[in-house]
Image (cartoon, grey):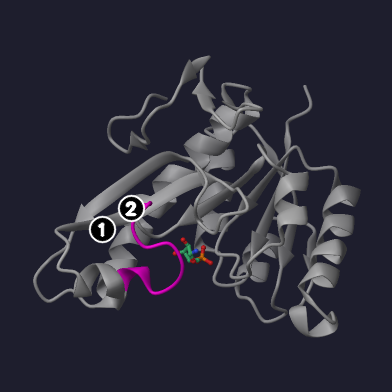
Amino acid sequence: MTLPRLAVLISGRGRNLEALCAAIHRGELAAQIVLVISSRADAPGLAVAQRHHIPTAIIEPSHHPNRAAMDTALMQTLDAAQPDLIALAGYMRILTPDFVLRYLGRLFNIHPSLLPKYPGLNTHARALTQGDARHGASVHFVTPELDGGPVVLQGSVAIQTGDTPDTLSERVMYQVERHIYAPVLHWAATGRLRFTDQQQVQLDGTPLHAPLQLYGYMT
Ligand code: GRF
């Protein structure tokens, strides 16, 4: 049986990429990562890909005159790899609507906040400034609105006295992020999770009206 083909886009350390590789290794994500694309030549996540013998490509903004040209290069490289699913995993670039619409329904992102709270950057600091009791991360379908597509699964940790953006982001990464991406991609890879033409999310044929929560989700 040929496994669904997954491409992963990164810009940084690649901890989410590592978690996906580990899930595949454990048999929890029925997909093969066929390509990792980084927007930075110095991203430590490239070494993660190499360690797992995954082909890599580097597509950097400085090599392209504008965002549209950059995304065209990205689409050409992606299409050559024929991915069924694409996962943004710490990819720190805003994608053009052309790009997003081309892969609508098979393009996912992981974002470190309890969306719809705190789209964009500096989410950990913003949750602390607001005095939130909990903070977390979300996996969502990507639509042209930044961090605005429907959330499939999210999880949270309690904010503790003395937390800094760094301590909080570490806890969210290790207690939430590393656990929520693989299940969503697995459901998509196995045809259980769908994004309909009406932009409705369905899991096992049932509409998902609210995000699933880690520790409550089905396997
Ligand atoms: C993660 O917190 C991810 O949610 C955010 O950027 C960070 C990337 O970390 N968008 P890594 O590259 O997966 O280590």
Give me the residue at 78% from left, 85% from top: 62
Left or right relative to 194: residue 218:
left
Contact, CB < 8 Å: mark 1 with mark 2?
yes
Q: Judging from the image, what secondary structure is the residue with disc 2 in? A: loop
Q: Nearer the viewer, residue 190 or 140?
A: 140
Is 107 situated above or below 99? above
Would residue 79 be counted in the magenta stretch? no
Characterize the magenta stretch by its predominant secondary structure. loop
Give me the residue at 59% from left, 40% from top: 24
Furthest-front residue in view? 198
Q: Nearer the viewer, residue 80 or 101?
A: 101
Which span of residues is magenta-colored?
Answer: 114-124
Quadrant assignment, res 125: bottom left
**In x, y percent, where is residue 143?**
60, 48
Characterize the local packing of mark 2: few (<14), some (14-19) or many (20 or more) Cα atoms within 10 angstroms: many
Furthest-bottom residue in view? 62
Mark sitting on residue 30: none
Query: Visible in this render: residue 54?
Result: no
**In x, y percent, where is residue 16?**
51, 57
Give me the residue at 73% from left, 30% from top: 3
Locate the C terminus and report the quarter of the image it occupies.
top left
**In x, y percent, where is residue 196?**
62, 26
Q: Amino acid at mark 1?
A: His
Quadrant assignment, res 119: bottom left
Q: Amino acid at mark 2?
A: Leu
**Circle 1 sits on which residue?**
135
Give me the residue at 18% from left, 74% from top: 163
Disc 1 residue: CB within 8 Å of ligand 1: no
